[in-house]
Amino acid sequence: MPGSAKQLQDILWRAADKLRGTMDAARFKEFVLGLVFLKYVSDAFAERHAELGEDPAAYRAENVFWVPPDARWDRLTGDGAGLDAAMDAIMRANPALSGVLPKIFGRDHVDQDRLRELTALIGGARFTGHGGRPARDVLGEVYEFFLERFARAEGKRAGEFYTPAGVVKLLVAVLQPYHGRVYDPCCGSGGMFVQAGREHTGDITVHGQEANERTWRLAKMNLAIHGIDPYGLGDRWADTFADDRHPDLRADFVLANPPFNMSDWSRREDDPRWVYGTPPRGNANFAWLQHIIARLGEHGSAGVVLANGSMSARTAGEGAIRRAIVEDDLVTCMVALPANLFRTTAIPACVWFLSRDKPPHTRGRVLFVDARGLGTMLDRTERVLTDADIARVAGTFHAWKTTTGYEDTPGFCRSVPLEEIAAQDHSLSPGRYVGAATAGPGAEPHADRVARLTKVLQERLDESRRLEAVLREQLGLLG
């Protein structure tokens, strides 16, 4: 990244600290990103003003937001009422932003002196003139930088809107959602769509839903920043189970990171989405899976990040649902993710890859990938997937899918027939199938033995945590 863009990120983050502590974290995030977006819109407009003049249609034809005169940054004084009016004017002038930008700056609880300081600091940053790079590209990087920094600052609450970049890239690298209809039923701040849009080689349309109002607004802004039409996120936020906004959608690709083990969700026993069985009241993992399957088109495929318990749980009907999904031959690949990828939760995670159109040679089989040994520790608590890690998992999947150079690798990957999975009570934990890495003839090396036994212990600990949660739920019902 050019130094000037990095400096811009640092300036804006220092500016953001001006309001820290004066409001709750979610509102703080909306404040800062709203102002950053307003500054970008004004800079991008000014960049083309000499060429396009005052004709709004000319800007729309160039995919640039039209900024009415009174909403341009050089006309703003930093007072809350003026900022709210500017946000309103930009939304009226650009239908794609209707109802998206925050109008929260003139409220009584907002410290207007600090707001003017923040506005002045952001006013000193420019999104143009960074080595000839378009303002949109610079803002896209800044916005993603802010989302990640807010995720670190907010901790557990950040899980509402942010999926680690490495996990998003992994899903995109495996599924390659570069054309057609791309859907995320719990889209957070829209990171799945942005990554798919960045990589795509053809036309995609995005369709999504988000239950949290503020997060929905962030997603709409995020898509608009990256030049992706945000229309597919609907005209309002809504809960996917209580108010499905895309009931007739048949997606080509679904990418999703639903809330892990969600216990408070809108459940109806007669819901037509429960083709494989009614999900338990206390855990929505298999509700998400079945909703996603219901939205897959005839040739559709999906990648879904879930808690590890989804791979082996057998209580409250979950085992029967998993068995039915496996026996319908919808599962293409299961990936066990490394620990500590999610700063917002310690729950170990996996990825389910599903398809309604498996290649003939893969039908009746599932590819298992144990990626728990991958990743690099960023600090003492957070691990990241490197590009090489992502390429290894995605390359293994595509080699298996196309029969181009695929081989089972002990300790990492194995292609397993459904009959063997049935013999394991339809458990989908990769560690059960891939075995331990081999080190040639003779006794098992000490390091390999430690690695193998560590995997076994991790599986047992995961199962213990899952059973503890079930037990607590049942005790609660008795009480």
Image (cartoon, grey):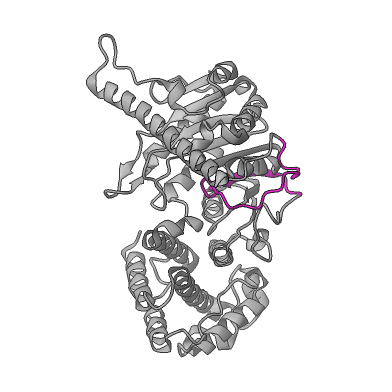
Left or right: 251 as drawn, with respect to 22: right
Percent position (x, y) of residue 256?
56, 47
Q: Nearer the viewer, residue 87 or 72?
A: 87
* Residue 449 on the magenta segment: no
- The residue positioned 45% from the left and 39% from the top of the image is 468
- The residue positioned 41% from the left and 59% from the top of the image is 151
Percent position (x, y) of residue 133?
44, 64
Percent position (x, y) of residue 77?
46, 90
Residue at the top extreme?
442
Percent position (x, y) of residue 149?
38, 62
Left or right: 172 as drawn, with respect to 381: right
Count the marks: 0
Q: Quadrant of residue 332?
A: top right
Is 374 situated above or below 115?
Answer: above
- The residue positioned 27% from the left and 50% from the top of the image is 379
Q: Main secondary structure of the magenta part?
A: loop
Is 28 situated above or below 334?
Answer: below
* Residue 270 on the magenta segment: yes
Q: What segment carries the magenta color?
A: 248-275
Left or right: 63 as drawn, with respect to 455: right
Q: Nearer the viewer, residue 173 or 272?
A: 272
Q: Quadrant of residue 121?
A: bottom left
Quadrant containing the N terminus in the rendered view: bottom left
Q: Nearer the viewer, residue 42 or 461?
A: 461
